[in-house]
Amino acid sequence: MKIQNTLTRALDEIKPLEGNKIKLYTCGLTVYSQPHIGNWVAYIYWDVLVRTLKDAGFDVTRVQNITDVGHLTSDEDAGEDKMLKGALKEGITAWKVAEKYIAIADDEAYNQLGLLRPDHMPRATEYIPQQIAFVEELENKGFTYVIADGVYFDTSKLSDYGKLARLDIDGLQFGARVADTGKKNPTDFAVWKFSNPEEKRDMEWDSPWGKGFPGWHLECSVMARELLGDQIDIHTGGIDHIPVHHTNEIAQTEAVTGKQFSTYWVHNNHLKVDGTKISKSLGNGYTLQDIVDKGFDLQAFKLMVLSSHYSTEGNFTWEILEAAQNRLNKWKEAAATLWQYDVLPKADKDVNAADFDTSFSGALQDDLNTAKALQLIDEVADNALAGAVCGACLEEILGSIHFNLGIDLHIPDISEEQKILIKERQEARDDNNWEISDRIRNQLREQGIELKDTPNGQIWSRI
Ligand SMILES: [Zn+2]
């Protein structure tokens, strides 16, 4: 099957490898430092992807790994080991660094952002014997060679190496010996790195080739295969993973299995801050805590992210976040009108819930068009605030399983007595009994409830 590097087809028409089961693999975080807002963008999109696939009736099994070893700062085989860097900075072992940031990331993703927990969250260090066995398989099939600093994958042995990124292999002087590194080809990559005898490592293991640790790309191939099988339906990750990390995952897995690794590859674009790349040196790597400290809801951040498509570059500014917060507040206000659905005359329910549901899920099924889906929520919210409440739409959309924006549809903040008063005031208005109408309005105002009259009836809000 041809490799797909987007979700170009309607999501509900995806043909899984097996029945209606979708096997999905997501590259997870490297747990060596405090995540910044840019790190969360991918997971916010993939959360909606999983919810949308489930909504379309698929049985989704999702694996998202935790990289706690082997990731070097260059994303290739050069640079510092990220875990060691974290350990040196914090004065604790790499194992403690991993524990600390696994706990922080877990709390941020699942408690604070309200994302769905993946079915499996394996740690690379829990799969060392399986990674060694995988390298042995590659070795037996003739795909590896050993040089001074590790065991390398020989990319010239695979006829379609680089197909995902459409790499210009000739342009990379394929086959030329690469100066300094001892690699046979520029694109070759380490599947096992040897420990440097001069450097103390907290994380290292014995292997048939020598003491060391697995190459970063290897863990994803191995954990995907162990938990999902030789072939999967969808693999997600950031666009920066296309030329190296995902290209190498494909190479290793397909070299071992002889089968296509994943049917779909889906990549999210990055978030910039104030139009520039997030970097530690610029100090613009804001955290979720920074957002909370400035008085914003984290759900507003999610809303901000989802207002653009996963494949386009996003931009974060405090002004854009404020606009998202205002939008969310408006939706919350609209949700507070939900109970009125029961007391309004039938004629005012002028939004067709069934049509709405179709267009909403249709937008998401269309390659995850989150921006369009959010605009449809705006329409419902505007209608609701104008008194034309579509109870089913509000229930369906604002409490939507798709976004989990923390909107409470069953706000217990006015009493039954107050609702009865609102109803009585409507009756008084219908009878042109302004004295009673004003009295009730003042009575409610004293209780902290303001009433707004719309052509479709009254809407309350807290003063
Ligand atoms: Zn990966």
Image (cartoon, grey):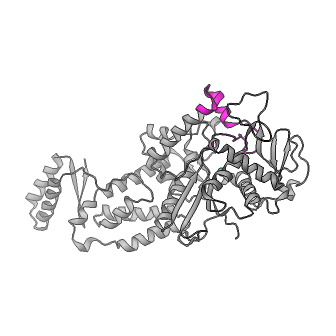
Quarter of the image for residue 80 reads top right
Q: Can residue 80 be seen by looking at this rendering?
A: yes
Quarter of the image for residue 250 reads bottom right
Q: Can residue 322 be seen by looking at this rendering?
A: no
Q: Which residue is drawn at 26% across and 71% down?
A: 348
Left-right relation of 392 to 321: left
Q: Main secondary structure of the magenta part?
A: loop
Q: In what quadrant of the picture does the N terminus appear?
A: bottom right
Q: How many discs appear?
A: 0
- Chain part drawn in magenta: 67-96
**Residue at the right extreme of this rendering:** 176
Q: Residue at x 58, y 31 (%)?
A: 96
- In the rendering, at what x and y percent does residue 338 appear? 28, 60
Q: Does the magenta stretch include residue 384?
A: no
Left-right relation of 111 to 37: left
Q: Which residue is drawn at 45% across and 63% down?
A: 375
- In the rendering, at what x and y percent does residue 294 appear? 44, 38
- In the rendering, at what x and y percent does residue 154 appear? 83, 52
